[in-house]
Image: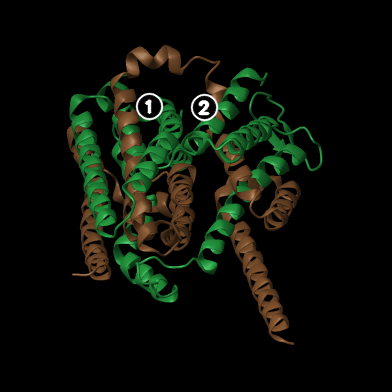
Chain colours: A brown, B green
Amino acid sequence: MNTQQQYESYLKKTHLLGRIVSVVTLILLVGAPFAIGALLGSAPDLGKTLTGFLAVGLVWTVSSVVEFLVYTPMLGAGGSYLAFITGNLINMKIPCAVNAKELVDAKSGTPENEVIATLSIATSSLVTILVLAIGVALMIPLQPVLQDPRLKPAFDMVVPALFGAMAYKYYRKAPILALIPLCVMTLVFTLAPSLTGSTSFMIIPSGALAIALAYWFHIRDGRKAGGAEKGEKQP
Amino acid sequence: MEVLQSLNSGGVYLICGGIVAFIAAVCVVFMVRAWRAGLALGMDRTKMKRAVTASATFSVLPSVGIFLGVVALSGMLGTPWPWLRLSVIGALHYETQVADAAVERFGTAGGGMTLEIFPTVALLMSVCIMWGMILSALFNKKYTDRLRRAGEKPEGNGKKAGGFGDKAMAAMFIGMVSAYLGSYLGSFISRKPGPEGGAEYVSAVFSFRGPWMPLAVALAAALAMAVFTYFSEKKKMAWLDGFSIAGSMLIGMLVAAVLPA
């Protein structure tokens, strides 16, 4: 079996495993409230769950569809099965996988990217599971440290700290490309400050704008390169 | 108090802990398979180790932040359920919002949790966010196969040259960062403290009295990242790369702890 065939076989088994594991996890997560309810002597009210879903959940459904479409190409097959099972995509898994991919210079859509993204998401998930398990085990003695008012502002700012660091990393590579969506988003949030509660949804237009601009630059650079080649060939 | 005692009972821990253990086993299986596949593809072992180390160091700080989310939610939902939700599938902003909304809709007059409504709240939290996993189970293969076909052809050693795909992914990331930084800037420009003070802010276009801490933290983290990058690139300290994001985040968060709120 050559390398390509081995890779194809790996992908095929990954899809099979990913589907089985996703379905099992789904059953466990939906089943858990029923099991806990049985333990507590009550049961979930399906009617209330439905009305609650229509009121609260539809918006998250749209978000899930977008996340699936946007993040799957970044993470590859194995990485996305794991990421959608383990969650915390925007605040951890995506930047973590992108960081790992950058470190080893793996190109999107390559077998190398598939392997690195899966390794990265699996490692990240295990670290979270471990940290949370240790934290939960130590919860009682840790309470005074964790609830120290001096630490609270720091942990409230995990996301801004993450995006500040990532901004330097990515903006310096394409400052002009970065400047336009940043200015547009700042303007949008300035004129409609109530949107700050929906920042995760504003990723969609912001990302679309950045991709459209990147495509335009890509086409323009391609034409320039083509023009230069023609110029060199002419006597 | 009695409600929390029941929600923190051994049986609930067992149910939630069992699911967390299953997911941990799944992660190990995917990791071992990917490692073996990488070796079979002829990938450099050092590169894979570097990816694992960087991902581990990268994830420690956000995981501590996620754990604090467990602490925050444990007052309302007990400890085991937030532990499960934030270990598997969940995200803090989502869990917090849905749990709050659900308790508000189904809860007692005072908005508190009862043993009667807990299973309904827990089911709603599960149902609202399961669609990514369902889509992944149904369409991941079709979608990734299509993406692979749309990509460039292999170049002998199984490695493909990066085309617009890479630029699009970088652009998507730039878009994501811009949305968040734009929200911090817009929030600072067009919000002001609410009448009740504290962390409450209300809309006030061009008042320049909104929360400035996220901006200060993002700026500090970006500056720290610039320093890390300088040493990594100019001083040939490439090993710093694996710690640059986590280190920058830590410095940004320290600024939040040091600066007056």
Query: Which chain contains the residue that carries disc 2?
Result: A
Query: Which chain contains the residue that carries disc 1?
Result: B
Q: Is residue A86 visible?
A: no
Q: Quadrant of the C terminus of chain B?
A: top right
Q: Is residue A7 visible?
A: yes
* Residue topped by disc 1: B74
Residue A230 sits above or below residue A15 on the image: below
* Residue topped by disc 2: A155
Q: Quadrant of the N terminus of chain B?
A: top left
**Given the image, on which type of amino acid does mark 2 rest?**
Phe
Q: Residue at x 21, y 42 (%)?
A: B25
Residue A10 sits above or below residue A33 on the image: below
**Given the image, on which type of amino acid does mark 1 rest?**
Ser
Q: Residue B245, percent across and down?
A: 52, 37
Residue B114 sits above or below residue B184 on the image: above
Q: Residue at x 56, y 32 (%)?
A: B248
Residue A30 in the figure: left or right of residue A90: left
Residue A41 in the figure: left or right of residue A224: left
Q: What is the residue that sits farthest to the bottom in this orientation?
A: A235
